[in-house]
Image: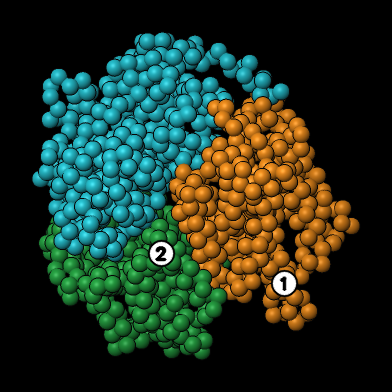
Chain colours: A cyan, B orange, C green
Amino acid sequence: MLGSLAVVAAGPVSSHAETIKVGAILAVTGPASFLGGPEARTLEMMVEEINAAGGINGTKIDLKIDDSGGNPEKAISFAKKFIEEDQVFAIIGPSTSGETMKIKGIAEEGKTILLSAAAAEVIVNPVAKYVFKTPQKDSYAVQKIYATMKDSGISKIAILTDNTGFGSAGKEQLEKIAPEFGIEILANEVYDKGATDLTAVVTKIRSNADIQAVVNWSIVPAQAIVAKNMRQSGWEAPLFQSHGFGNIKYVEAAGAAAEGIIFPAGRLLVADVLPADHPQKELLLKYKKDYESRFKEDASTFGGHAYDALLILTKAVEQAGTDREKVRDAIENMKNVPGTGGVFNFSPEDHNGLALDSFEMLTVKDGKFAVYTK
Amino acid sequence: MMSRHYIPVGIFLVLVIVVQFATQVTATGFYLTQLTMVAYYSLVVIGLCLLMGYAGQISLGHAGFFAIGGYISGALTTHNLIGIKDHPAVSLLERAGLLLERQDLYGSALLTVEPWVAFAAAIVTAAIIAFAIGGPVLKLKGHYLAMATLGFGIIIYRIVLASYFFGAADGISDVPAFELFPGLAVSGKKDVRVSNYYIAWGLVIFGTILLQNLIHSRIGRALRSIHGSEEAANAMGVNTARLKLHTFVLSAVFAAVAGVFLTHYNGGIGPSEAGVMKSVRYVAIVAVGGMAHLWGALIMGVILNFLSLRGVFGSFDDAVFGTILILIMLFAPNGILRLGLGQKIRNLLKKDTAGD
Amino acid sequence: MSFELLTQYLFAGITYGIIYAIVAIGFNIIYNTTGIINFAQGEFVMLGGMISITLNTFMPIIPAIALAVIATMIVGALIETIFIRWLDTHSVLRMIIITIGLSILTREAALHIWGENVRSLPYFIGNETSSISILGARVSPQVLWVIGVCSLLVLGLSAFFRYTSLGREMRACAANRRAATLCGINAKNMVTLSFVLSAGLGAVAGCVMSPITYTEYDMGPGLAIKGFTVAIIGGLGNSMAAVAAGLLLGIIEALSIIVVPLAFQDAIATTILLIILFVRPHGIFGSSEVASLKEF
């Protein structure tokens, strides 16, 4: 009864409003705050800029960010609140895959566009009509890493992953894709995300002399700890990291031990060395400059995921106006839109829109990111 | 004179109905979503209140029992057995009517455990675990008891975080509705919002009646005597060890039931539900309500959880809980309802409920 | 297992063990004078690290660490005077809840002051890749700093309790508060002092370990749990036993990797904690009679 009442009262209001409401569910605090923090700051910055310029075709954005702290039950509560109560036009976030999967069905039922900033493939596979995501697929990162290994003649490796959602998704893809590239995983260890010393596990892996390279797939600070512990123990085997390494802070944290780490990442980190005609170059440089001058910290690819989400939404609203269904269709048919993560080409079958080439293999040279060349 | 105890329950029932009507009249039915979630957390809180307030035993691991309930029910009702349909064990279960064939959102066929069966499995597991650890744990006192229950909570958290069966860090998603009986299901769908509100609060009211009866019975008096002085209670012929254990198991079952229902309502569960911070919150709410004060715990649980789930505290959610915890313990260690105005209200209530 | 591998594991174990021991001693000092388990003990370690890192951006590392330790000691004193000193009753439950609340508040304050980023002090000697070869194992020089500084702290503390009049007054308070008061010792000041000492101890550990383990706003609870476990294994209140227990736990954790999947490593300490509590709540080094006598 009540449900139908609310629908009748609400239906057309949002589509003809002066502003469009956007709800963001981000893990600003808690264990995933390294994602949610930059994402929230990026969105605030962008919305301010868009509104200062008069909005999207005169329609201003009314952004509301709710901090889920990485808790799925809060994400669920907020998603329902946004959809049923605030009747938002679209939801950006959540930051983590676990949370996104909890509200995928809720967004679908509420016919509200969801632009997730989380990486897991299950978010867009199977495809849900209203659910999109902006980060590159983990499988692309793995393919890039394995292809690079093959080029260097590496076939026997150890993989280390942490016990976050990011780590376990990476582990799954690393294990799944290895046979395609003829790569053999000789050691496979999962450690706690809060681990502060991995000397013991590095020592253990190292005792197997066949291992030619190590892949570490984790969030901070373990990414830096693995690197340090490997180099301290005098082990010079190549270290590959996930695209989660995409923040110069982690390079600083690992210091001298970061030299030579190889990892796939979006082009944000090497924006200044891209060729001038690269479609992403202008946008990347602008985002980097705006973010860094405003927040006095380095821009990361994580903030970029939120940037892409709002960018895609803005483009779609520019094209299709403020009708939610039309905007959804516009996103689904969007082609050749450069974002921070790559060039987006959406289709009804692909709600991620990024291709394998959205990743570039990078390395660390003299404390800076550089494009990896063999 | 037992019926006197039901007066607050009656008031409470009326309040639940009034709130629902109010949201209907003002077209603010969306509040029911958080109010339903709050009800399930309240169920944990009143169970813990019995243990802490009446039996005097602290538990910093109750989120563990909530998680046992939610995770077992969630895992059993989502793990697809269709691939191993021909396995003798699976077909045996199917013939026994313990499995349910359904389709997921995208139309693929699923064969999962029937929610009632999963519910039973979850509750029995929680009870067995509570029974097994309750024995040695409840022999401890003070800091030792606090640490042992904290340790239990951490181990459960570690297990769900490290097991792929429980979805590791992502937790379990796409948990189906729990059809209690035809036409009435625990589900987060918008069109069953009102009925779910009543399911949740019906469960809480049932729980409070149960606890009210217990508290005002001989068992309740024995429990309070344990809280007062365990030695004296023992000397008076109360089997304190057994009584404490039964209370512990009962409160664990309350938490597990809440876990199962909320997991089906939310359509999923994540490791944060098993976290230490959650256990601390339950303890905080019981403490703020006034320890041996079922209604106080219930009211504070509703207020604090409701505000938290609506995101009112923003990025200061944990900080707000921490502050409340400290302020209450510094200035009103007997609970907020026993201060000033609260005292007067309590006196009024006492007049109603006195005469044991 | 080769000898080199074993020494490598042992060094990892000892580094962590000694840090756990320092946290456990922090618990013990406060427990002995007040009967309170300070659930915010891990936060002192975090504060020491965070403050020194901030100060290190505009002053050399040694004064930065010194000032950070003093600042953390002041925080310890403030916590005691604001939240504990004036309370008339110190029931166990009340103190558990207050210190848990303090732990949450400190952590949240740190999040809003320093943000969610991981930070660290620079290595005292060398850098992230330098290592020294000892008995076939390759060890970062910072590990030797951690072990050295923490050992000095332990020795210094035990000398303090044994040979200074202030230390003896604190011991008197721990043994019998009423008798100590009758002898003219200001027991309340001794409690404040115990918080100051315990905060300073944590802060020093937080500074020396920062280059190796990094400093994060939410590192406190994890350390506190390890610290409890060690305090319990050694027998609550017994600081010298805590050192042995800390090393034991550190080494068990480091060696456990041979048999237990790494993901469960953190559950090992908790499991040991539960087993000890169920079987020998007064600790494996203490007897029940000793446990009733408080000793630093």
- Left or right? Give the position of B332 relative to A304: right
Residues beneath discs 2 and 1 located on the same chain: no
Q: Does the image show residue B207?
A: yes
Image coordinates for residue A249, horizontal then vertical, percent: 22, 45
The N terminus of chain C lies in quadrant: bottom left
Would residue B129 be found to the left or right of residue C234 on screen?
right
The x, y position of residue C217, in whole percent, is: 34, 53
Q: Which residue is mark 1?
A: B242
Relative height, residue A175 to residue A130 (above, below): below
Q: Residue at x 43, y 89 (%)?
A: C183
Q: For the residue marked with disc 2, what is the amino acid? A: Val
Q: Which residue is mark 2?
A: C260
Left or right: C184 in relation to A358: right
Q: Residue at x 19, y 27 (%)?
A: A285
Give the CA distance from mark 2 to mark 1.
36 Å
Residue at image coords 57%, 49%: B71
Marked residue chain, label 1: B
Between residue B303 and residue C280, name the one nearer to us.
Answer: C280
Q: Position of residue B196 (x, y in %)?
A: 69, 35
Residue A264 visible within the image: no
Q: Residues within 10 Å of mark 2 (few under 14, many from 20)?
A: few
**So how many labels did they put on this image?**
2
Rendered position, B142 above or below B41? below
Q: Is residue A312 above or below residue B87?
A: above
Circle 1 crowding by C-alpha within 10 Å: few under 14, some 14–19, many from 20: few
Secondary structure, mark 2, is loop
Quarter the C terminus of chain C occupies: bottom left
